[in-house]
Image (cartoon, coloured by chain):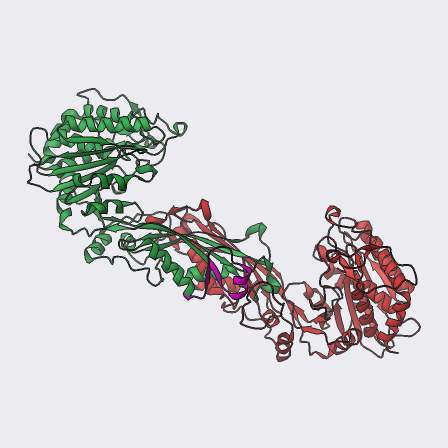
Chain colours: A red, B green
Amino acid sequence: MTPVERARRFRSTHAARLVRDFAGLLAIPDVAADPGGLRRTAGWIADRFNALGADAEVLGLDGAPPVVVGRIEGSGGGPTIGVYAHYDGQPVDPAAWSVPPFGPTLLTGRLEDGGEEIDLPADGTPVHPDWRIYARGSADDRAPIMALSAALEALQGSTPDATVVFLFEGEEEVGSPHLPDYLDAVADRLAADVWLICDGPVHQTGRPQVVFGVRGFAEVEIEVFGPPHDLHSGHYGEWAVNPAAALSDLLASMRDIDGAVAIEGFDQGAAPTDAEVDAARAVPDPGDLGFVPNDAHAYAEGLLTPLLNVRGIRSGDVGDASRNAVPATALASIDLRLVAGQDPVEAIQSVRRHAAARGFHLVDGKPSAAERSAHRLLARIDGVPGYPGVRTSPDHPAFEPVIEAVRAAAGDDPVIVPSFGGSVPLHHFEALGAPLAILPIANHDNNQHSPDENLRVGNLWYGVDVMAALLGG
Amino acid sequence: MTPVERARRFRSTHAARLVRDFAGLLAIPDVAADPGGLRRTAGWIADRFNALGADAEVLGLDGAPPVVVGRIEGSGGGPTIGVYAHYDGQPVDPAAWSVPPFGPTLLTGRLEDGGEEIDLPADGTPVHPDWRIYARGSADDRAPIMALSAALEALQGSTPDATVVFLFEGEEEVGSPHLPDYLDAVADRLAADVWLICDGPVHQTGRPQVVFGVRGFAEVEIEVFGPPHDLHSGHYGEWAVNPAAALSDLLASMRDIDGAVAIEGFDQGAAPTDAEVDAARAVPDPGDLGFVPNDAHAYAEGLLTPLLNVRGIRSGDVGDASRNAVPATALASIDLRLVAGQDPVEAIQSVRRHAAARGFHLVDGKPSAAERSAHRLLARIDGVPGYPGVRTSPDHPAFEPVIEAVRAAAGDDPVIVPSFGGSVPLHHFEALGAPLAILPIANHDNNQHSPDENLRVGNLWYGVDVMAALLGG
């Protein structure tokens, strides 16, 4: 029997108990506001893995929730695979939930689709894969932890081919402030051929997906200064610089409607490989979202290049409040989505240089009278560098066993996503020196970060199967 | 003696009494909220002109403040000159005034410069030209009415060369809604070789000015539609049209930073004549306003062309409220300043055509789902046509006696302003068929439309002298 076949036979026998066990984990509050709950969660996880023959330990740094670090020793016949997940969840507002966020509740389906509450199953009760477990952290992100422990249990009695090293953290939802320190402290235990970040949902179509990168992030604020005060537009509309018009001109010079960025040096990041472009073109489009999309490229292909997104503009007044004036200022708020190899600080600098090359004198704050008297075009451009993007080509050989495991578990080729469009601080894991991929488990409609978060049982089973396939043997 | 010499001798003898007479007019409330005050003001004016041998009449239309229409019969040796002024003033908030708005108060100078209140002068008291009369309507716009009556009094005993026809209205400050009807009703009494709109201030330098046009006005609102709801900028930043970026692109395509408009058909108005351009280049610049002006042209030259002013933009959020999203909409509020010969409705249409030519599908309101599914670029462009501009070349022969009169009164060449940048519904007077010019009397620092409105006595004297020179004889 293959590992996946063993996992399936195991969970067909123990499905009800696995659901109850998972409910036991989900009953422990896992939010930042409850440090004791986070510690109990970490303890529950380490105990479970140790009981199954793994070597798991709860490690704590002062003032931070602990991590669970562990190792499942393989036979040496397979690769060493790193598995990351986080056991903390988003904050909860119980009043906004249909069920208690930490009173795990089983439903026969999605609440919106008429799913009805049922008791947790007794041994022997058939468990339907469309059932849903409602609780904070059920999908994001305790599902992969439960799945790995269940796979390990399914394969008891033999030694897996692969060695798995794992790290489960407890403060991802507050920005992972201590993750670099933890990684640094236990780096010697985390050496692996490949690291899998087990978080997020599978594809909207229900197909499994493996994601080989994320974009980085930076923020930029551009404030263009017109006259010191609003001026009568009839008398001074030609005489004074209109900052709303100047800002529009500057933004239009930076990017076109399709999103192509025309800032010199902004494309310094990694150019997509042929394999990445091919994979991106094969990713299904998001479907009909109620608008005609830009047609410059396939959906995921666009995510392989950096983006300058205008998230807001404020200048003067509009509507009933509008006055016939040249406004004094115009403000744009921008987020930059960066590709691997693109330095956030340098990306911000390239925006500043672009504006300067178009004649703007850059000031640090509100311009002084002397600056106003010396320069016609004045702008303040402040940046907040976030973090860089990460991308590894899907054709890297370290990913072969991962894709093979997904295929074995799902009976279907996974969607190969060369990069998420969104930003995740995946770069922290680059310190480990291994190729990185994101391997999601949860259903796409899991209400992530919202009330009524839930995991489809079938997705938990997919997680068990894929973890078993990864362990091999 | 010239008429100006006669006016000066007269007012040197009667200065104190003229100031007291003017105070008598200013003591009558002249605001829209007090219809009785407006009627009494009109009566005061007609009585004064009739007492001086003019033929003045108070005419009323139902539901409107009356106008004073009159005629000063000349010898036939000069032109017929039309004089317009308005006897109503801006609303008052007495609490914001330093003096009672309708308790005319004489000060030795400008309040801000330490001017001190003095009693209205008794006969024989020397009256200093830098004294100021504080009251609502002292400058805007009862000064020209007082000046014309004083000039007529100064020239008593002989028949002037020119015939003056006049119309003083009482609802200019609420938009002159009945002016077209009044002009239509008494058009046969208002035939003239030239019409002078006596309103507004002289040049900031203190030099007299004659203004030969105003710009027209229209409003445009552009709303660009992105996705139906805000979308995650990382995942959809390339896929969905960003309306803030699309609006910026559209605005930048319509005008440059210097204010040059690139909309086809927007330049359909009157091209400036050589005389207008020469005059515009000779108008003093506004001086140092605390910024470096656009340098595409001399200040007033810019006012001879139409303007597209962006008075406000709103899209998404900025600052602490900014979210990493593609906003759903972007809104720009625009005012158009139109030159003579440019149709406001057509100007708005040219903006719409411009957007359509750049690929925008124009919708009437929020786009329907069908419109969203059919068109990538969607915009709503609504216009409010205001009124057209008016301009007559300063070298029109009808203006020769006007410019000569100003020169005689001021001892200085007037500033020849081919067009104000601002907008005034001067076009109503085009129905009278005569060349139009604006002949201001008041000091530039008269606090027009603000509390503590005031007239410098020297400017009243200038008004008396220029009216006497116009009457001639």
Q: Which residue is drawn at 73% across and 76% down?
A: A413
Location of residue B33 in the rendering, given as x and y in whole percent from the top left corner: 36, 30
Location of residue A356 in the rendering, given as x and y in whole percent from the top left corner: 45, 62
**Which residue is nearer to you in this view: B147 or B268?**
B268
**Which residue is nearer to you in this view: A380 or B95?**
B95
**Which residue is nearer to you in this view: B425 or A341?**
B425
Work out whether B156 lies above or below A94: above
Work out whether A156 lies above or below B124: below
Q: In which quarter of the image is the C terminus of chain A?
A: bottom right
Q: Does the magenta stretch include residue A397?
A: no
Residue A14, can we see it? yes
Q: In this view, does B162 lie to the left or right of B389?
A: left
Q: Is residue B376 magenta?
A: yes
Location of residue B226 in the rendering, given as x and y in whole percent from the top left corner: 53, 60
Residue most toward the top? B122
Residue A355, can we see it? no
Location of residue B37 in the rendering, given as x and y in whole percent from the top left corner: 31, 26
Q: Residue at x 24, y 51 (%)?
A: B391
Give, as a single range, the part of the protein colored magenta.
B357-379
**Which residue is nearer to you in this view: A203 or B386?**
B386
Would you identify the image quadrant in which residue A418 lies?
A: bottom right
Q: In which quarter of the image is the N terminus of chain A?
A: bottom right
